[in-house]
Amino acid sequence: MNDDQFRQLLGYFDFSWAGYRKVRKGVKKRIGRHMMALGCEDLASYLSVLESDDASRLECDRLMTVSISRFFRDRRLWEGLREEILPPLVRGRGEPFRVWSAGCAGGEEAYSFHMMWALLKESLSSMPEVVIIATDLNEECLERARAGVYTPGSLREVSKGLRKRFFETLVKGQRYGVKPFLKENICWERHQLLGAPPGDGFHIILLRNNVMTYFQEPLRVEVLNQVISSLAPSGLLVLGARERLPESVHGMVALPDYPFIYRKEPG
Ligand SMILES: C[S@@+](CC[C@H](N)C(=O)[O-])C[C@H]1O[C@@H](n2cnc3c(N)ncnc32)[C@H](O)[C@@H]1O
């Protein structure tokens, strides 16, 4: 598959060329193998199979997903949440604090949140229970997340102290497993972001490095509005550090100093 054909395929799904530019080699390879398995010699015949066969389209959609992630990706976000943003929101709250990690890849983001929550507990006297719903389209990602086993590359932003506290060494220098208590309070679910959200009243939604990177408008706006509808009043939407909401999304205000975190305006 050449770049022109890949662009056409991206157009079929409303996905963004700019977003896929750096990762296109691997994705094209996966799609090429899928085309061969379906006996499609050119893009036109592949698109016609995708049009007529739901299972093939779903599989193609899954093969298009990019599941790059790591623990505490964007250090500034995690420091900001712990030191500045979360304390006034959670101190003394009675009801559970609801978090949605949307497009959670192999679970690195959801576990990072749970680790940060454990650290926050040490500095605040009264904290609510946390409930984390972590979803992804890709079942293989969810299996990895449930297992909670990672290579050193995923832990490269985890300090030695935190590694000791939150991980078990399974094979020295090769495999690290999250400690079992971190798996509590996380519910892993297969979920397609184009569909209805997996719940409502979320106090924080982490929607990082997926919709704003890989989708193009108008799909972005459609998905963003659905996702935002599941936020509690004044709930926070967190994007990737370099991602920003399109102007056509209303009712969300960026936090001072954190242009990638938005608060839902009440009403
Ligand atoms: C690049 S990873 C980002 C992981 C994590 N949020 C982070 O920032 O480190 C994008 C994830 O979004 C998921 N994803 C992409 N499109 C999706 C969709 N339409 N519905 C649900 N998940 C999707 C992919 O499977 C992948 O695991």
Image: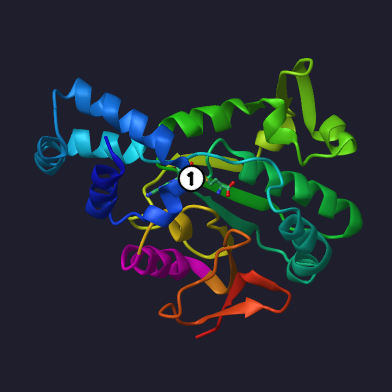
Instruction: Give the left or right position of residue 161, taking residue 221 as reference.
Output: right
Nearer to me, 245 or 167: 245
Q: Is residue 229 magenta?
A: yes
Residue behind mark 1? 22
Q: Please state, as top left, top right, bottom left or bottom right, where the N terminus lies in the image.
A: top left
Please state which amino acid type lies under the numbered disc 1: Lys
Closer-to-camera residue (2/90): 2
Q: Residue 173: x percent and y percent?
A: 77, 18
Q: Is residue 180 above or below residue 2?
A: above
How many callouts does the rendering have?
1
Numbered disc 1: secondary structure: helix
Prevalent SS, magenta region = helix
Residue that extends furthest to the bottom in the rendered view of this protein: 267
As drawn, 94 above or below 108: below
Residue 43 in picture, x, y percent from top left: 16, 38
- Asked whether residue 45 is drawn in magenta, I would say no
Q: Residue at x 21, y 23 (%)?
A: 36
Task: Give, as a single range, the part of the protein colored magenta.
Answer: 217-231
Res 261 quadrant in image: bottom right
Asked if residue 22 lies left or right of residue 180, the reply is left
Quadrant of res 54: top left
